[in-house]
Image: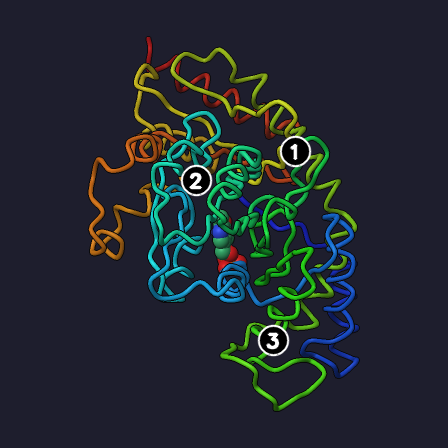
């Protein structure tokens, strides 16, 4: 089976974890500091703050911006739930804005329609590894004095005109979850150019204590720290991330070459100037394909090709969000795409032969059904 996700973990990571275990310093320590320094440099930002997950990174970012009760935060309904839940965790209101069909990312024109006096921030997502439309969203944010928290959880190393994901917001957030492009098992990091916000994030992950004065609590905080074992893995992965991402792009190119022109399928669109990191390689299965998305998924599984649906339902149609008044028809583009998207294996361990096998399987399935 060609699996949809597979972590690349080598001896280097294993040795690094063993070294931490032998050192006796298992909680946040020198590897966390190293990862923060190196990750900030990688993104081209002044500060990086390692945390226990991407969710924690988003929660901390909203908290340090002072988002709370009575505030509204605009985000996309076509994302993982952890983009939106931290808004609720802060007692604020999630306001969704529909997405664009080509990039799957939030539509700036839809954001514009949702801005009110209560809007405080926007959380655009770099979905599947393609940065959101920064120029257009930043313009709206500047016009209305809104903050941006970039959800770059899926986009480590992605770029717009050479500028890296992690720089497209007042704060940006990454996830190092086990299936991401860069992994630490669980884990995440926040990037920012603001020394003040960085210090607040450091306190937020540490029960509101500053790292200088322990047992002095300045505000509400959580235990969102990363362990030194996780950070040690992250430091190893960061050395190889450009290679991982390059391989993902190569696999994506092979898939696109092979699938381009198959009737009823749309291959991923990459915007001019964007360096996509293909956390997911996601095709759209249209009505003129001879079977439904779910039937194609099942047929691929039978032929030894794994695939995934990210995401089968937009957030506003889940019971938790429907209770807030959202309903079917509110975000037609997200609703339509949720029925049609299918992600194919694109991780660095997909070989050239695997990519060929994926293409052949899809073509055969399509032709058999057409006969
Ligand atoms: C877009 C997006 N946002 C947020 C998260 C949350 O990250 P984590 O699972 O590390 O909490 C993820 C990953 O799971 C994600 O893909």
Residue 70, image quadrant: bottom left
Report which residue position mark 3 lands on. Answer: 203
Q: What percent of the width, then of the height, locates residue 351?
A: 65, 33
Confirm or reject: label 3 Cβ below 8 Å from ligand 1: no
Confirm or reject: label 1 Cβ below 8 Å from ligand 1: no
Q: Residue at x 76, y 49 (%)?
A: 42
Q: Residue at x 45, y 30 (%)?
A: 303
Q: Residue at x 60, y 73 (%)?
A: 225
The answer for how far apart the CA atoms under marks 3 and 2 are is 37 Å
Residue 111, image quadrant: top left
Toward the viewer: 2 or 320? Answer: 320
Q: Residue furthest top?
A: 371
Q: What percent of the width, then of the height, locates residue 103?
A: 48, 29
Report which residue position mark 2 lands on. Answer: 308
Asked whether residue 164 is in view, the answer is yes
Residue 28, image quadrant: bottom right
Report which residue position mark 1 lands on. Answer: 160
- In-image side of 304 versus 239 (left or right): left
Toward the viewer: 21 or 103? Answer: 103
341 w.r.t. 150: above or below: above
Q: Residue at x 53, y 41 (%)?
A: 126
Residue 312 image label: none
Q: Tally the marks.
A: 3
Disc 2 packing (10 Å; few <14; some 14–19; many ≥20): some
Q: Secondary structure at mark 2?
A: loop
Toward the viewer: 16 or 319? Answer: 319
In this rendering, which labeled residue sits more in front, label 3 or label 2?
Answer: 3
Q: Secondary structure at mark 1?
A: strand
Q: Secondary structure at mark 3?
A: helix
Toward the viewer: 81 or 89? Answer: 89
């Amino acid at each position: 089976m060609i699996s949809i996700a597979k972590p690349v973990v080598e001896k280097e990571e294993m040795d690094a974890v063993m070294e931490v275990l032998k050192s006796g310093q298992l909680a946040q320590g020198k590897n966390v500091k190293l990862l923060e320094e190196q990750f900030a440099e990688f993104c081209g930002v002044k500060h990086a703050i390692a945390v226990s997950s991407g969710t924690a990174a988003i929660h901390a970012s909203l908290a340090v911006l002072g988002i709370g009760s009575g505030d509204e935060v605009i985000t996309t309904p076509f994302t993982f739930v952890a983009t939106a839940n931290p808004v609720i965790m802060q007692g604020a209101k999630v306001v969704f804005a529909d997405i664009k069909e080509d990039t799957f990312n939030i539509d700036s024109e839809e954001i514009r329609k949702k801005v009110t006096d209560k809007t405080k921030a926007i959380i655009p997502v770099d979905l599947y590894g393609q940065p959101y439309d920064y120029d257009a969203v930043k313009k709206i944010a500047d016009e209305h004095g809104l903050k941006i928290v970039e959800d770059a959880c899926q986009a480590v190393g992605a770029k717009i005109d050479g500028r890296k994901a992690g720089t497209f917001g007042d704060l940006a957030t990454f996830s190092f979850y086990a299936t991401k492009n860069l992994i630490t098992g669980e884990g995440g990091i926040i990037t920012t150019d603001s020394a003040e916000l960085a210090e607040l994030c450091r306190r937020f992950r540490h029960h509101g204590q500053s790292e200088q004065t322990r047992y002095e609590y300045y505000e509400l905080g959580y235990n969102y720290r990363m362990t030194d074992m996780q950070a040690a893995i992250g430091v190893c992965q960061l050395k190889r991330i450009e290679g991982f991402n390059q391989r993902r792009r190569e696999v994506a190119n092979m898939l696109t070459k092979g699938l381009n022109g198959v009737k009823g399928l749309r291959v991923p669109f990459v915007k001019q100037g964007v360096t996509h990191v293909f956390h997911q390689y996601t095709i759209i299965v249209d009505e003129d394909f001879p079977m439904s998305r779910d039937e194609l998924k099942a047929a691929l599984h039978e032929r030894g090709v794994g695939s995934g649906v990210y995401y089968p339902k937009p957030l506003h149609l889940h019971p938790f969000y429907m209770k807030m008044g959202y309903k079917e028809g509110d975000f037609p583009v997200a609703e339509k795409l949720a029925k049609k998207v299918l992600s194919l294996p694109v991780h660095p361990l997909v070989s050239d032969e695997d990519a060929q096998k994926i293409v052949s399987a899809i073509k055969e399935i399509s032709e058999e059904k057409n006969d």
